[in-house]
Image (tube, helix red, strand yellow):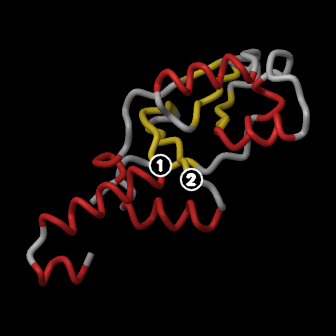
Amino acid sequence: MLVRDAMTTVVLTIGPTHTLRQAAALMSARRVGAAVVLDPDTCGLGILTERDILNAIGLGLDPDREPAHAHTTTSVVFAAPGWTLEEAATAMVRGGFRHLIVVKDESPVGMVSVRDIIRCWTKARHTATPEQAALV
């Protein structure tokens, strides 16, 4: 199974000046654990996760004053839609993160999470024959 089969294609994109509270409210409303941060000044893509917001609040920072860009990961590992789920999972384990931005032609086309991968693998195991399930 490929990343394109598991990824979410509606990606929450925010700007670097959104506050952490604004980002959290958008992520909560969309029921997602990460947002793509698009910074037109740097022409770069970054990612802001629920863990980034939690860490900032845990440090006592004001979520109404803290801009997303101050907590955005910019050294992002991107996935391609044609990656296998094994390749995506390996990248996540190696990097210690739970989300990958899926990029095609240098533009974000989706997001894949550990939960997406598990959902696909679990579904595949339940629909496979016993012989196939042993290989999943």
Between 93 and 65, the one lying in front of the other is 65
Quarter assignment of residue 37:
top right
| Residue 55, percent from left and from top | 79, 42
Q: Between disc 1 and disc 2, whose residue precedes? A: 2
Q: Which mark is residue 2?
A: none
The vertical placement of 130 against 128, above or below, is: below
Badge 2: residue crowd in 10 Å (few <14, some 14–19, many ≥20): some
User: Which residue was labeled with disc 1?
Assistant: 113
Q: Is residue 20 left or right of residue 9?
A: right
User: Which residue was labeled with disc 2?
Assistant: 98
Badge 1: residue crowd in 10 Å (few <14, some 14–19, many ≥20): many
For the residues marked 1 and 2, what is the alpha-carbon distance in whole angstroms? 6 Å
Q: Quadrant of the N terminus?
A: bottom left
**Numbered label tally:** 2
Residue at x-position 64% and y-position 32%: 45
Residue at x-position 38% and y-position 61%: 85
| Residue 17, percent from left and from top | 76, 15
User: Tag 2: residue type?
Assistant: Arg
Q: Quadrant of the C terminus?
A: bottom left
Residue at x-position 41% and y-position 67%: 86
| Residue 66, percent from left and from top | 84, 22
> Considering the numbered disc 1 on the image, is that residue within a helix, a strand or a loop?
strand
Residue at x-position 57% and y-position 20%: 26
Task: Say whether marks 1 and 2 touch (CB < 8 Å).
Answer: yes
Quarter assignment of residue 16:
top right
User: Tag 1: residue type?
Assistant: Ser
